[in-house]
Image (tube, helix red, strand yellow):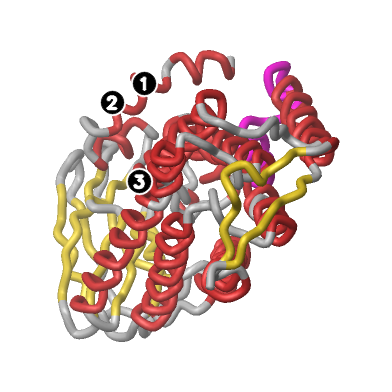
Amino acid sequence: MHRKNILLLIFAFCLTFHRSDSEKLTANNHELLFDPASLTVSVGRNASTTIHLVSEQDEPIHISFVYGEDRSHSTDYIKPLASIDFPRHSSRMGMVLIITGLRPGHVIVGCNITPAFNTNLTDRDFLRINIALSAKLDRIINIIGWFSFATWSFSFYPQIVLNFRRQSVVGLSFDFLALNIFGYFCYSVSNIGFYSWKSVQDGYVKMHPHGVIPVLLNDVVFGLHGFIASFLTIFQCVLFQHSGQQVTYAASILLFLLTLLLSITTILTSVNRMNLLLLMYFYSYVKLAVCAIKYIPQVLMNRRRKSTEGWSIGNVIFDFLGGILSLVQMFLFAINYNDWLSLFGSITKFGLVIVSITFDIVFIVQHYVLYKNRQQKPDGYQVLDNNEETTAVTINS
């Protein structure tokens, strides 16, 4: 069954762009539709959504609104909504709701229906509202997010260009390359699963009824782009001078164990011993673990060679800028929506950005301070057993 998900991936990807929110909700057999089902409004400003009654009813329907996970009858995030009434036989009829923001934050609006439907509406039919402190700040946050995305995406290319100009990959750690492409493979699989596979999305919604699928289209594109760029860099290692460097035994064993783990979990999923959502989480956890350690081999290689030649500082600078922009975006988001849980509650994302920035700082110090005036002689690089290197170093005066 799960193999069919893979075969239908392209079809599901295309279909996503042609189905409206109302069509998606109707396909899920909802009794009520909010269109849009998620909206953002600024404090002191208004926004609107339309509530539709989907099922044909033989008697009038009275709807009152409740707020938050505890389904309270009052809220201080938005101006409370007045109850509404649908007349009998009013299938597909819509009523406009005006949402007025009162203070920054997030709130879920649910429904109490009289007479009650046979289905449980609380798990499926709700309106998600994000209340921003400032609409202008919200636009700035989005712009910073796209700059961060572009900067991180561009960070792959200085290394590729440097390798091509030198016609050599000497100085570039093969362990880093192996871990990097493996990490982006896992990241892409996880993102595609969350973004395109209905069984994964249904499992996530069941686990988090009021949650948002945590993967967007730009996440899928970035992961695939990172995998392709990493593959191009590895392909350069085949074409250009590499002085006999190989992936170390330690990195090979680690990759073998991670591959074995993912292979076992994938097989268990294919025979219905484990659900597909859990498998996607396994792939994402492996990606996180790889990201935390993948730069260590390059740091050690630079230290051993007393040089950063062959390792592009442009790659580091763009990665550093992308990380800083991402941190700024997260802090501004927390301020604008009074949502510090999104920053410190998601310790994985926040922690990985910090780890990445920390390694970038180490590389910058190595390049501009520790080994600033040191270069490798063209014929002074020798690879010994187990990838141990000896180098002949000249110090420019």
Helix, strand or loop at label 1? It is helix
Task: Tell me which segment is drawn in magenta.
Answer: 269-286
Q: Would residue 358 be counted in the magenta stretch? A: no
- Earlier in the chain: of badge 3 and badge 1, it is 1
Residue contact between numbered discs 1 and 2, judged by CB atoms under 8 Å: yes
Q: Position of residue 66 (x, y in %)?
A: 40, 69
| Separation of residues labelled 1 and 2 (CA atoms) | 6 Å
> Disc 3 and disc 2: Cα gap in Å?
15 Å
Q: Quadrant of residue 20?
A: top left
Check disc 3 and report the residue beneath it: 218
Q: Residues within 10 Å of mark 1 (few under 14, many from 20)?
A: few
Q: Which residue is mark 2?
A: 14
* Residue 259 image offset from top left, x and y in percent: 74, 30
Residue 221 locus on image (x, y percent): 37, 39
Task: Relative to 37, say whether 347 is above or below.
Answer: below
Residue 131: horizontal and vertical position, in percent?
A: 31, 75
What secondary structure is found at the residue carrying circle 3? helix
Q: Residue at x 30, y 71 (%)?
A: 141
The residue beneath circle 1 is 10
Instruction: Nearest to the eye among marks 3 and 1: give it.
Output: 3
- Magenta stretch prevailing secondary structure: helix
Indicate the quadrant where residue 25 lies: top left
How far apart are the two marked residues, 3 and 1, measured between alpha carbons?
Answer: 16 Å
Vertical comparison of 49 with 336: above or below: above
Q: Against 278, is 370 above or below?
A: below
Label 2 residue SS? helix
